Amino acid sequence: MNIANVRILGGEPVDIRIDGGVIAEIGPGTAGTAGDVVDAQGAIVLPGLVDLHTHLREPGREDAETVQTGTQSAARGGYTAVHAMANTSPVADTAGVVEQVWRLGREFAHCDVHPVGAVTVGLEGRQLAELGAMADSAARVRVFSDDGKCVDDAVLMRRALEYVKAFDGVIAQHAQEPRLTSGAQMNEGVVSGRLGLTGWPAVAEEAIIARDCLLAAHVGSRLHVCHVSTAGSVEILRWAKSKGWNVTAEVTPHHLLLTDDLVEESPVGAYNPIYKVNPPLRTRADVEALRAALADGTIDVVATDHAPHPVEDKETEWSAAAMGMVGLETALSVVQEAMVETGLLDWAGVADRMSAAPARIGRLSGHGRPIEVGAPANLTLYDPSVRTKVDPAAFASKSRNTPYEGMTLPGRVVATFLRGRPTVLEGKLV
Ligand SMILES: [Zn+2]
């Protein structure tokens, strides 16, 4: 299938000829007119998006999401590869479980699925999981995380960082000091004070990030920091990078757009658990710092932290509600709103933060490549000129817990191609 009239990273319109899953030719008129040609009508094309942080929930919570529905959701969002987090049931802490998830991804083939392996057995923070066996498995795991929980034991964290050096792995830390966040419900600040909800202090995130940067430097290993949410975390990362340490970081779309005062006042009322998320929504000053850090490269990646939950786990009182938001199908639009329309990133910058950088961190050689002859045809066609109201009923995800319901956001994923084969056309699953 060929693509006509498409603007690479927003440039001048060209055609792209695809042959054998690879980009064979780029230029005017190369798509031809016969056979399978998609007329992009001037849409932009980005390298297929790569998510470093997706919760697919299978095995164990198939009522919230499955590998099939989660990867359909990813394809609709323009993603060609996702990293599936390990906090499933059973936990992805053995070669057997990561291979199971990887095989399901291959079977449904809406996008590539790269399982993340747990750092510790059962995410319990007591003993290291079989990191080497997961790395050697068919799933070729390179990213390890206890996400949902923090590896708070400094000795275990040090050992994990040392262990993954043997196979060029990376530890992705969910930075949350557990005792400082015991019972925490939302960002600690003026709003939590007014609402009487237990605060989640910024220092609980920042203390772990500072410690882990020092540990990674000490053992000469790779650290990736999940969902950075505070201005102070940005300062620590900037310092660690200035030292030349091998530290990378991600920010979620929701932390680039939403703030903690939505818990007090929002279109869906006060105390609405749709805004309950880990780490919590922070202040306007934090949002501004995160945007600036993503723009200047201090934060390397936008990762969705797509966290599907069934209605009964979200539509309950605040303190009992599950933490998390779905994000795959709105990520690119939110990034356009927060970063492109504000002039902070151009489309080349978006391609780097949402495709090239996450592929590099996850060591995915077939993704995140520049759009050029010889590269695998993993492509996202996106029309940034439209604005649409977010309708969760249209999501491919099994869950609907989006904070953007009813909001008007820019842009629309027109088509997604996985090695030349469309997974989405005209905004619909193929
Ligand atoms: Zn997390």
Image (cartoon, rainbow, N blue to C red):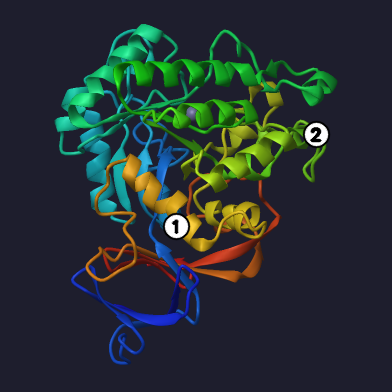
Dot in front, 1 or 2: 1
Give the residue number, with chain letter if any, for mark 1.
351
Front position in the image: 317 or 275 = 275
Left-right relation of 331 to 160: right
Name the residue at 54% across, 12% down: 178
Marks 1/2 in contact by CB < 8 Å: the verdict is: no
Looking at the picture, which amino acid does disc 1 mark? Ala
Label 1 neighbour load within 10 Å: few <14, some 14-19, many 20+ = many
Looking at the picture, which amino acid does disc 2 mark? Ala
Left-right relation of 174 to 370: right
- Secondary structure at badge 1 equals helix
Q: Position of residue 87 (x, y in %)?
A: 39, 27
Q: Position of residue 89 (x, y in %)?
A: 36, 26
Front position in the image: 344 or 228 = 344
From what the image shows, is residue 121 above or below residue 241? above
Q: Position of residue 103 (x, y in %)?
A: 22, 43
Numbered label attached to residue 227? none
Give the residue number, with chain letter if any, for mark 2.
270
Q: Quadrant of the N terminus?
A: bottom left
Q: Quadrant of the C terminus?
A: bottom left
Residue 119 visible in the current orientation: yes
Q: Position of residue 203 (x, y in %)?
A: 62, 17
From what the image shows, is residue 182 above or below residue 54? above
Q: Residue 23 lies in what quarter of the image?
A: bottom left
